[in-house]
Amino acid sequence: MDRLSFFSSPLFLGFDHFERLVDTMSKAQDDSYPPYNIEQIGEYGFRITLALAGFRKDNIRISQENNQLTIRGKQDADPKATYLYRGIATRQFIRTFVLADGVEIKNAEFDNGLLHINLLRIRNESMIKNIKITSPSEEMSSRDLQAT
């Protein structure tokens, strides 16, 4: 049986990628590790900052697939260390953010245990496009012209 969704309405033609994004977001774990901030930088900039105490730059991987930004981190515990109390997490994590269309990753910086990912929203000018209405006979002659 097919699954019905909000995006199966005929009013949402071509929005199937949004449905995939919603599915991805709903499957994502609601884990609070690592903690992060999202801040506005200027009119078109954003910064995601993750607190990664104990991680090194080479323990972190950042990737982007379509509109999904994924940060992965894995650090190995020191096998020689003997802890009396262990409050700093050394576990692996995956943190995912869904980016809006028109948002691109500018760069990433790692400084003093904080990973900063700088994003930029590309400002697209609004564009109005007029669509020409033709009759079936005009459409046929335009197809004949394109075929030659």
Image (cartoon, helix red, strand yellow):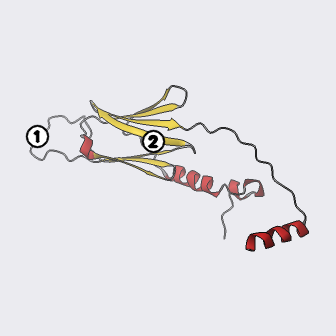
Of circles 1 and 2, which is in front? 2
Quadrant that contains the N terminus? bottom right
Residue appearing at x 69%, y 39% in the figure: 126
Residue 70 lies, in percent from the top left, at 42, 48
Residue appearing at x 75%, y 57% in the figure: 9
Quadrant that contains the C terminus? bottom right
What is the three-letter code of the residue carrying label 1?
Thr
Reading the chain from its start, which is encountered first: label 1 or label 2? 1
Camera-nearest residue between 23 and 105? 105
Residue 124 lies, in percent from the top left, at 62, 39
What is the three-letter code of the residue carrying label 2?
Ile
Residue appearing at x 85%, y 70% in the figure: 141
Left/right placement of residue 104 relative to residue 132 reads: left
Residue appearing at x 14%, y 44% in the figure: 78
Q: Which mark is residue 71?
A: none
Residue 90 seen: no
Residue 20 lies, in percent from the top left, at 58, 56
Q: In which quarter of the view is residue 86 placed?
A: top left
Residue 62 seen: yes
Task: Give the residue pinned by disc 2.
Answer: 105
Task: Give the residue pinned by disc 1.
Answer: 82
Disc tally is 2
Vertical arrangement, residue 114 with respect to residue 59, above or below:
above
- Mark 2 element type: strand
